[in-house]
Image: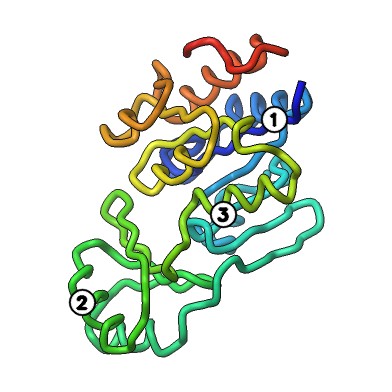
Amino acid sequence: MPQIALATDYDGTIAQDGMVDGPTLAVLARLRAAGWCLVLATGRDLDDLRQVMPRLDLFDRVVAENGAVLHTPDTGVVRLLAAPLPPSFPAALATAGVHPLRAGRVLVATWEVHEARVQAVAASLGLDLRLQRNKGALMALPAGVDKGRGTLEALRELGISPAHCVAVGDAENDLDLLAACGLPVAVANASPALKRAAALVTRAEGGDGVVELIERLLRAGQSWPVPEV
């Protein structure tokens, strides 16, 4: 059997209200013990993620900031997959009245209601950005950055073909993640667009849906692809 992986989103997928419950953590550990590699792909920055998710050690790679940052929990290595946005950008956004603002190592995040102002400030600075909406939030990233490309780089480091990766998510910023992987899965609470992009949709929502999926993966054993969820 080829080496295989599960790439999962965080908020709304394995996490509810920012936290991952015990049963979900336990089944993730079981999957890894069964020989699967685990990749966490999130829009959160690493500092924020560490505050809510103490078990990053369960994952072989963490794709943070919506694909801009790649972290190896086992070694502590953090690698930027894109050049950081200039400090003048969040400063200009603040001057333009864009609040709240959160700056990671690469991305700058605010609320979707400020999209027109973000576009105007980016244009004034001559920045080539990708604006990613996600459940009312707005992430400003360098052009070409997304969860799919970040996950592909994680899989390349791990020596795993994207065709042998199951991806699961719930929101708009997971579309690129699902498109990059061999078996795209949406949890039951996913957006309509994500459900349309998925080959499988779980019956349960969020972490319960991921537990449902992983139990199916574990039962499938050597079978690939897995039976329908």
- Residue pointed to by mark 1: 4
Q: Cβ–Cβ below 8 Å for labels 1 and 2? A: no
User: Which residue is found at the position 49% from the left and 51% from the top?
Assistant: 147
Q: Amino acid at mark 1?
A: Ile
- Residue pointed to by mark 2: 117
Q: Secondary structure at mark 3?
A: helix
Q: Please state the horizontal and vertical placement of residue 148, each as a whole percent of the image.
A: 50, 48
Task: Give the total of numbered labels.
Answer: 3
Query: What's the CA distance linking mark 3 and mark 1?
Result: 17 Å
Q: Please state the horizontal and vertical placement of residue 151, each as a whole percent of the image.
A: 58, 48
Q: Nearer the viewer, mark 3 or mark 2?
A: 3
Depth check: give the residue in front, 210 or 144.
144
- Residue pointed to by mark 3: 150
- Quadrant location of residue 50? bottom right
Q: Earlier in the sequence, mark 3 or mark 1?
A: 1
User: Which residue is found at the position 42% from the left and 23% from the top?
Assistant: 199
Q: Amino acid at mark 3?
A: Gly
Q: Secondary structure at mark 2?
A: helix
Mark 1: few, some, or many residues within 10 Å (few <14, many ≥20)?
A: many
